[in-house]
Image (tube, rainbow, N blue to C red):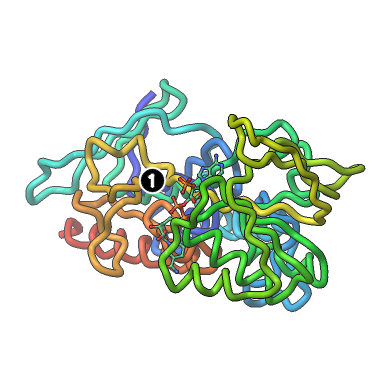
Amino acid sequence: MTTNVQCLIIGSGPAGYTAAIYASRANLHPVLIDGPLQGGQLTMTTIVENFPGFPDGSEPFQLLDDMRRQAVRFGTEMVSGIVTKVEFDTNAKGTAPAHRIWVDDKDEYVSQTVIIATGASAKWLGLPSEKEYMGKGVSACATCDGFFYRGKTVAVVGGGDTACEEASYLAGLCQKVYLIVRKPYLRATEIMQQRVLNNPKIEVLFEHNTLRLTGEGKVQGADLIYKKDTTEAEERHIAIDGFFLAIGHHPNTELFKDYLERDEEGYIRVAGDSPCTGVAGVFAAGDCADPHYRQAIVAAGSGCKAAMEADRFLQKFQH
Ligand code: NDP
């Protein structure tokens, strides 16, 4: 089955839904393919307290469902499925491009514009207990969830800029922060390292790896190993209330690698602060093109920009 559309949006986080709201209000009759995790990364947090307009916070599923309903109200067609292949039209000259997108390996869409809002995924250590305590003390976003650990003890894993930034941020809220680093040094930039090393609330545990998380129904501790795989290896237990992963993110952009320029981490390169990619009629919004901010409100704003650019782009062919 082939369906022709003006605007196809890939991804159902704040970027995708906001793009859908704007595209449908611009009469582009968008189709949104929601992808493997409906609602995106935000669904992994417990409560969203930094999205403006919700003074008492918002339950993430509710917030995303409201965005979704808002998009549907203006005419967005929601499709459940995963985009499995794309063929972007790089040869259109003087006519609207015909980008081809396959959903679940069977349904084909031919779209004049595509808004990619596939987000990024936090990297995980791969411990079974990480999954078990997800939302019960395990988090991959200090800015989102740090507030729940005011006055408590938490651990952050990682030795890069994200880990140092998150540890410093959490030290402003928590009683104590352990920074678990697998190497004997930090990889973060010098200034971030100094900020961490000079903070009396942060204890850096160099050459430590996490074996497992422990606790009754929620995280209450972590078993670590010092100098793993050496003769000096030694296990150690720390009591913590929260466990923050900061070992990097990977953008969900593999599908587009043959067509779009990406940076060394895989983030889609856009022109300046616009959502425009190097392919006419293809736009990128949200975390898939943003290695820096990774916030729902920023993603929503970039979704708006992408829809406005898609509308502007289509207007060129309406004569
Ligand atoms: P990085 O890839 O720079 O760092 C990841 C860290 O996690 C490393 O210390 C790495 O250890 C560690 N790690 C990876 N896998 C594991 C594992 N399985 N177990 C334990 N530790 C692990 O990611 P970041 O997210 O920190 O940064 C990404 C990019 O964004 C960087 O270029 C960074 O500079 C930039 N950034 C800039 C900021 C700023 O300027 N304010 C803020 C945040 C990010 P190892 O060193 O041993 O490989």
Say which residue appears at 31% left-offset and 54% top-offset: 283
Q: Is residue 94 left or right of residue 72?
A: left
Q: Seen from this angle, which residue lies furthest right?
A: 216
Identify which residue, 193 or 53, lies in the foreground.
193
Question: Dot 1: few (<14), some (14–19), or many (≥20) neighbours within 10 Å?
Answer: many
**Picture layout, residue 266 above or below residue 178:** above
Identify which residue, 78 or 11, lies in the foreground.
11
Quadrant where the N terminus sits is: top left
Residue type marked 1:
Leu
Say which residue appears at 25% left-offset and 68% top-offset: 272
Whether residue 143 is visible to the viewer of this picture, yes or no, is: yes
- Residue 82 placed where, x, y %? 48, 32
Whether residue 69 is visible to the viewer of this picture, yes or no, is: no
Residue 156 picture quarter: bottom right
Say which residue appears at 28% left-offset and 50% top-offset: 263
Describe the element under mark 1 as helix, strand or loop. Answer: strand
Quadrant where the C terminus sits is: bottom left
- Residue 161 placed where, x, y %? 47, 62
Identify which residue, 33 or 302, lies in the foreground.
302
- Residue 87 placed where, x, y %? 25, 33
Q: Seen from this angle, which residue lies furthest top?
A: 106
- Residue 261 placed where, x, y %? 23, 47
Identify which residue, 123 or 64, lies in the foreground.
123
Residue 277 picture quarter: bottom left
Q: Which residue is mark 1?
A: 8
Q: How many marks?
A: 1
